[in-house]
Each structure stands twice: as C-alpha cells, then as structure tokens.
Amino acid sequence: MASPPTKQSLLHLYHSMLRTSQSFSSYNFRQYFVRRTKSTFREIQNETDPAKLAAFYDEKAKELAVLKRSAIVNQLYGGWRLVVEKQKPQHERSDS
C-alpha cells in the first residue's frame, strides 16, 4: 500500500490545479474548473483516513494531467472574450 500524501503535497496539487484552471482562455471553462477544484479540495480538507487521502491524491493527479491537456487545447482554439471579462483597452491613433 502506498504511503498517504503529505499535507504539503496535497497543497502543491491544489495550487497546480488552480494555476492550470486559470490558464483556460474561455471564461466559462476557467470559472467552472476553479470552482470545481476549490469545492473538491474543500470536501477532503478534514479527511484523516490515509487510504482515502491516497486514493484522492492519485485521482486528482491524473485529473491534473487531463486538465493541463485540455487547457492547452482551449488556448489553441479560444474564442472571443465575453462581456463579463476584462477587456484589453483599445488604443486610439494619436495622429487623428
């Protein structure tokens, strides 16, 4: 049986998943994965069973790999920005 993950390794996984979730170019995907990551880690926050923690860590590590690949594809084929997102300022010509 594998040893349970340390608190530090769980925090590292959590931050990696949040960072990857923030890298989606699509607003809806980005917000969904951030919310989902926070809620799943909140559920396991007070868990003390080493077997459950090890299973959770393994599952989320695999999910992180899928999330990274999905974020790359989303960046390649990202669409227009939505109205709710911060828009990049439009530069005006100074000679007009």
Image (cartoon, helix red, strand yellow):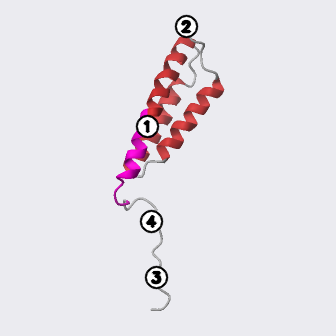
- Residue type pointed to by label 2: Met
Q: Which residues are magenta?
A: 66-81
**Residue sitting at 47 percent across and 67 percent down?**
88
Q: Label 2 vs label 4: CA separation?
A: 50 Å
- Residue type pointed to by label 4: Gln
Mark 3 crowd level (few <14, some 14–19, many ≥20, 10 Å Cα): few
Q: Quadrant location of residue 80?
A: bottom left
- Report whether residue 26 is seen: no
> Which residue is denoted by mark 4 in the rendering?
87
Q: Label 1 vs label 4: CA separation?
A: 25 Å
Q: Say which label, 4 or 3, has the lower sequence index.
A: 4
Q: Label 1 vs label 3: CA separation?
A: 38 Å
- Residue type pointed to by label 1: Leu
> Which residue is denoted by mark 2 in the rendering?
1
Check if residue 4 falls in the magenta segment: no
Mark 1 crowd level (few <14, some 14–19, many ≥20, 10 Å Cα): some
What label does residue 92 carry, if any? Answer: 3
Mark 2 crowd level (few <14, some 14–19, many ≥20, 10 Å Cα): few
